[in-house]
Amino acid sequence: MQNPYAARHDLKDKTFRDPCVFWHAPSHKWVMVLAEPEKFGFYASSDLKVWEYTGSTPPIPDYGVLECPRLRTHSQNMMVAARQMAEKKAVGHLS
């Protein structure tokens, strides 16, 4: 697979880090979030080989190197929070 970020010829800095790839069921596409200089870039693909740039966050200047993007839906965040609360209660009962 060709790196979709590095393939863009208009870029001065071809640095990228830590892709987060996940299936987005509503669009029936794979989505990739890529840490790029001062922002996170978003890409979409139907086959995990050909990627289309779909946008980015606003620039985040003076933050340093951006790493490890991980997106979740609100409902996923709620499930994680509920699981963490349940685990804390279980640990509390063990001690």
Image (cartoon, grey):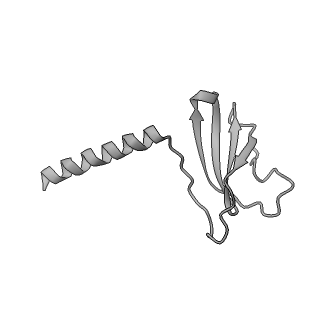
Q: Residue at x 82, y 51 (%)?
A: 8
Q: Residue at x 64, y 44 (%)?
A: 32
In screen coordinates, is 30 left or right of 1? left
Q: Position of residue 80 (x, y in %)?
A: 38, 44
Q: Is residue 78 above or below residue 12?
A: above
Res 28 quadrant in image: top right
The furthest residue to the right: 9
Res 61 quadrant in image: bottom right
Q: Residue at x 56, y 56 (%)?
A: 68
Looking at the figure, which quarter contains the N terminus? Answer: top right
Question: Which one is in front, 16 or 78?
Answer: 78
Q: Position of residue 15 (x, y in %)?
A: 72, 61
Q: Position of residue 50 (x, y in %)?
A: 75, 37
In screen coordinates, is 80 left or right of 6? left
Res 11 quadrant in image: bottom right
Looking at the figure, which quarter contains the C terminus? Answer: bottom left
In screen coordinates, is 13 left or right of 41? right
In screen coordinates, is 52 left or right of 25? right
Q: Is residue 51 above or below residue 61?
A: above
Q: Residue at x 75, y 47 (%)?
A: 4
